[in-house]
Amino acid sequence: MLPESRVAILRTALYLFVIIDIHLFVRDPIPLSRHPELYQPLLIERLFHLPPPSVPLTITLYLILMVGCLVAAANVLPRLAGAVVAAAFTWWTAIGMSYGKVDHDHLALVVAMWVLPTVGVIADRWRSMERSAQAGWALKCIQISVVFTYFLSALTKIRSGGWSITSWPESSILMWAIVRRPHGLGQFLLPYPELLHLMQWFSFTAELTAIVVLWLRGRALLAAAVFWMGFHVFTLAILYIHFAPTAICWLAFAPLERLGPWLRRVKAGRRERARGRSARHPVPVLRDQAVDSGG
Amino acid sequence: MGQGVRGISRMSYGWRIAATVLGIGLLLSGSLRMSDDLWPFGPLSQYAFSPAKDETIVITRVEGLLADGRRIDLPLRVESAGISRAEIEARIPQITADPALLRAVAEGWTSRHPAEPALLKVWLVQDETRLVNGRVGPARLVVLTTWELPS
């Protein structure tokens, strides 16, 4: 049972982020659709018999996404606009992943697109004072997806290392990644393979224990969020890997519902200060008034 | 100041619980048993492999010969070639079997660099760096295949 205003605010943030996402991160469906010989459809595309991408198709998807996201970000027609955006965005991102490289930073955002419409119409949008299990479920799904992005990544490392806990952290993976980015900051770390192993153990442990975030509250939750934001900033600096689509979904953990009352307090404070300033202006006294009319 | 609570029917509650169980199950199964093909339920396998201490690290590149005689690197990024390095790397066997697939890079680069002289020929090359006992060792350039653009 969580506040519906948190969902309303999160909708605005995430649908606007999707607009940024299709311009900055998954920005290759339209150029890639010019190369049909390189298209290798994923299971999701084969299962639904989605037509192979062509330039008119990807441009149409782009336009649908732009309009749908703007409408949904305004919390207007949340079920219709939300469903359209969910389907279009999933297909758009799938296309971006059907030419050889599958990225793994979109799980939380794609899940968010599908669960946000299920909360339905929120009457007062950002100012809603209602709470509901529907809002709670949607937010929990997004939170689980964020945490799973880290946790399943650790499980996949264990699996790919032949079901061993040590093979990934002890491998030369960071060295491999840094050598492949010859002009990055990571070059300074190359002469220190033991330091790289330490960093690998640290990130692996963080990912494996990420699941506890689902049970954290208050300061502990804030600390976890700050830690993971720092983690993403670090991998961005060393490896040019951002995980922005996952990072933005951390907002599902944040008490966004406090934004409304906070804004009201700020506005009221400003009004008080303005009134206080005008009260200090000297009011002209026309004439001394006798205290009592008698002499 | 009380907060209203929106009611939820048993059906609504029920399908949500079922969907959550299904979703978590698919995700766990995807990471533990499946492949990338199952996106978005596939394994989160970015950087999830373990190169050995004596691994050979390979950077795949495309080089091009221009009409003015210069041999340049054609950066494999979406904004300069319309296709990224990862996508070319995933297709190396297909490209060595049919070098004409490099057309994608050649056309992508040419359309984005109209002021440059014409591309005559492209090479698919790899910079190989060998790791020795976990440290960076000797490097060399390997040419995988080449394709001449039809004039």
Image: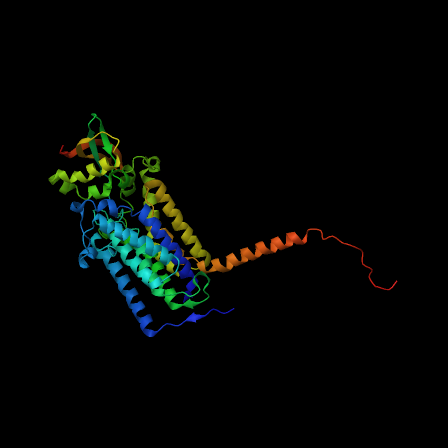
Left/right placement of residue A33 relative to residue A206 reads: left
Residue A122 appears left or right of B123: right
- Identify which residue, B76 or A208, lies in the foreground: B76
Answer above or below: position of A98 versus B124: below
Q: Is residue A139 above or below residue A281?
A: below
Count the numbered circles shown. 0
Front residue of B102/A255: it is B102
Where does the image place residue A249, in percent across and percent down from the top left? 37, 55
User: Percent from the top left, x then y, of residue A166?
Assistant: 28, 49
Q: Relative to A49, is A237 above or below? A: above
- Residue reaching furthest to the top: B69
Q: Residue at x 33, y 37 (%)?
A: A184
Of residues A286 and A33, the one nearer the viewer is A286
Please tell me which residue is depicted at 29% across the width and 52% down the height of the picture.
A63
Residue A251 falls in image quadrant: bottom left
**Residue at position x 37%, y 60% in the image:** A214
Residue farthest toward the right in the current orientation of the protein: A295
Is residue A151 visible to us here?
no
Residue A71 x/y as whole percent: 36, 57
Q: Is residue A272 above or below residue B79?
A: below
Q: Position of residue B52 (x, y in %)?
A: 23, 42
Quadrant of res A80: bottom left
